[in-house]
Image (spheres, coloured by chain):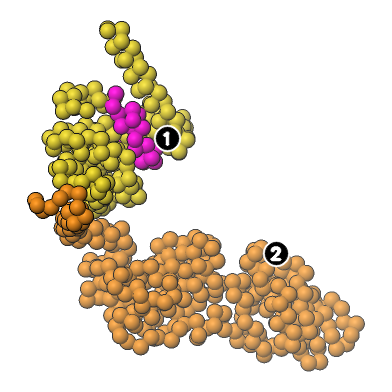
Chain colours: A yellow, B orange
């Protein structure tokens, strides 16, 4: 993907090149942690930070790294960043850290991170790599938010957000009357169902866009 | 590095080594910055409980430092309250197989400064009495000197035995920390059962035992039909007594109305066999975990012996 394309399509890529619903990367954590908005934002920010920094560092060392050791070098960089992010979260947002559990450490093996390091950062300069990291991280965060909004709303009937630093509630609004929630949405079945519906909707949008583009031609 | 060929093994080794070294430096820096906060956060969840024992104390988590002194595996956490003493988080398994957790504080001189349940699901009115806030058991424990054995609670033998073991484990670790001699195990003092006095000396008034002659075809062996209150209801037994020798020949429980799987330990065949040859002066230990039913059986035995003696 060229540098200009990254710059021009920052927002359109949110849908078309969405890592979760378009490229089907990082699905494991998406299905597991999207039970509430707090988890989604926390995980999204953590992945965005790791993704952006790893893209920057991978891009910085791309010219001095021989091909046959590039994977170990990238993994060491990514693992270091993930560990640091984990430490910072454990220190400043302990409740969020324990809610996300092992999925913070598992960012190391999140396909989006290594995927972008391999497919983009290792072939592009630092600036575009950083932008790519930000854009992909932002897309990932939005995907988690969409999933968690639907699951939390239908599963608990409440939309709520708390301050991860103090663990105090910022707001909590009940949108579905008590007794009409569908608890299935907070379970794994609900995660798969929500994921399938959103992926289908985005796929339909992409098909519609390409059909329109062909019609213009 | 400039003159090195990128494809050479030395270059690759140097590059990987440099990357790993730099990453290690970054990690150690991050650890130095976040470790104190992480430590504080860890303490944060338990601090409220520690404050119950030493309000306003200056606590530090010394679990990693001293946990190797615990050979029982019953100590979960060790916290030092600077200048005051140590607090232990402990666990044990009483009647409920899920077990329980509690905290116990020890002053620097070894006296017990606090005893509170953290999580327990012992039976209400029985094992749970061990963890009642301001309850008899807590008061008994808080009144102990450093060398006193941890007592058992009558009617809650299983739970209090487990508490006893955990408290002994904490005392052993405390002795290790302070370099003082390990105190004697409380279990050795009581062997896990309530020490009994002779049946004649025991107070069975709460059991309201009553006996009447059932058969006396053999003039030396009378069979008494006895009843006595247990934990939930009235139990009934046929007690055969050798009238001449004032000894019990056998006891057969004919109606058991206490808690199933708890009280029935006291009426098991092996338990009842212990009564053969028992006189009014014999000591019969309570059955661990079935104290109430055991008292009911002993009350019937005593009543039958008293009846045979013409008391």
Viewer can see residue B5: yes
Foreground of the two, A176 or A208: A208
Q: SS at mark 2?
A: loop
> The magenta stretch spans which residues?
A16-39
Q: Is residue B2 left or right of residue A208?
A: left
Is residue B306 depicted above or below A54 in this figure? below
Residue B177 percent location from the top left of the image: 30, 80
B230 lies left or right of A103: right
User: What numbered label is drawn on residue A191?
Assistant: 1
| Image spot of residue B56 (x, y percent) | 23, 66
| Crowding at mark 1 (Cα within 10 Å: few <14, some 14-19, many 20+) | many
Task: Kindly report the distance in space between the C-alpha atoms of the residues bearing marks 1 and 2.
Answer: 51 Å
Q: In this rendering, do the residues under marks 1 and 2 share a single chain?
A: no
What label does residue B257 carry, if any? Answer: 2
**Image mark for residue B98:** none
Q: Residue at x 66, y 71 (%)?
A: B265
Relative image position of residue B171 (x, y in whole percent):
38, 79
User: Which is in the foreground here, disc 1 or disc 2?
Assistant: 1
- Is residue B125 visible in the rendered image? The answer is no
Indicate the quadrant containing the C terminus of chain B: top left, top right, bottom left or bottom right.
bottom right
In-front residue for pair B219/A210: A210
Q: Where does the image place residue B306, in percent across and percent down from the top left?
A: 73, 85
Q: Residue furthest top?
A: A216
Q: Is residue A19 magenta?
A: yes
Q: Chain of mark 1?
A: A
Residue extending furthest bottom?
B245
Residue at the (51%, 75%) spot, across then down: B161
Q: Residue at 40%, 66% (x, y): give it.
A: B102
């Amino acid at each position: 993907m060229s540098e200009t394309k990254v710059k021009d399509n920052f927002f359109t890529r949110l849908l078309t090149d969405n890592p979760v619903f378009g490229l089907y990367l990082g699905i494991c954590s998406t299905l597991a942690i999207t039970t509430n908005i707090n988890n989604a934002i926390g995980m999204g920010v953590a992945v965005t930070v790791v993704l952006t920094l790893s893209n920057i560092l991978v891009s910085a060392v791309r010219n001095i790294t021989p091909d046959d050791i590039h994977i170990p070098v990238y993994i060491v960089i990514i693992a270091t960043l993930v560990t640091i992010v984990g430490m910072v979260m454990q220190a400043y947002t302990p409740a969020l850290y324990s809610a996300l559990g092992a999925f913070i450490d598992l960012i190391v093996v999140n396909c989006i991170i290594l995927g972008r390091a391999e497919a983009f950062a290792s072939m592009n300069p630092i600036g575009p790599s950083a932008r790519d990291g930000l854009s992909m991280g932002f897309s990932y965060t939005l995907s988690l938010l969409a999933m968690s909004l639907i699951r939390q709303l239908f599963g608990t009937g409440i939309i709520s957000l708390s301050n991860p630093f103090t663990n105090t509630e910022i707001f909590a609004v009940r949108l579905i009357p008590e007794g009409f929630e569908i608890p299935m949405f907070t379970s794994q079945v609900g995660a798969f169902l929500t994921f399938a519906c959103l992926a289908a909707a985005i796929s339909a949008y992409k098909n519609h866009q390409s059909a329109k583009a062909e019609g213009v031609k | 590095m400039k003159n090195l060929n990128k494809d050479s093994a030395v270059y690759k080794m140097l590059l990987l080594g440099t990357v790993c070294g730099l990453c290690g430096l970054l990690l150690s820096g991050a650890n130095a910055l976040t470790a104190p906060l992480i430590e504080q956060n860890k303490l944060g969840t338990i601090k409220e409980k520690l404050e119950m024992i030493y309000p306003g104390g200056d606590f530090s988590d010394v679990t990693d430092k001293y946990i190797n002194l615990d050979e029982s595996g019953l100590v979960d956490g060790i916290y030092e309250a600077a200048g005051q003493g140590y607090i232990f988080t402990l666990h044990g398994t009483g009647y409920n197989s899920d077990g329980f957790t509690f905290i116990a504080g020890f002053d620097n001189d070894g006296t017990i400064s606090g005893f509170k349940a953290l999580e327990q699901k012992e039976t209400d009115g029985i094992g749970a009495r061990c963890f009642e806030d301001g309850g008899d058991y807590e008061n008994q424990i808080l009144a102990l000197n450093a060398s006193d054995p941890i007592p058992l609670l009558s009617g809650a033998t299983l739970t209090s035995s487990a508490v006893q073991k955990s408290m002994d484990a904490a005392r052993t670790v405390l002795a290790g920390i302070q370099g003082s001699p390990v105190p004697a195990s409380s279990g050795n003092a009581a062997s896990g059962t309530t020490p009994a006095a002779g049946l004649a000396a025991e107070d069975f008034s709460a059991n309201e035992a009553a006996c009447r002659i059932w058969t006396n075809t053999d003039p030396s062996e009378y069979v008494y039909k006895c009843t006595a209150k247990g934990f939930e209801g009235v139990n009934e037994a046929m007690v055969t007594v050798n009238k001449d020798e004032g000894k019990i020949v056998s006891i057969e429980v004919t109606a058991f109305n206490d808690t199933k799987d708890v009280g029935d330990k006291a009426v098991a065949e092996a338990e009842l066999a212990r009564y053969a040859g028992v006189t009014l002066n014999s000591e019969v230990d309570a059955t661990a975990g079935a104290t109430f039913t055991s008292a009911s059986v002993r009350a019937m035995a005593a009543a039958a012996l008293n009846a045979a003696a013409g008391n």
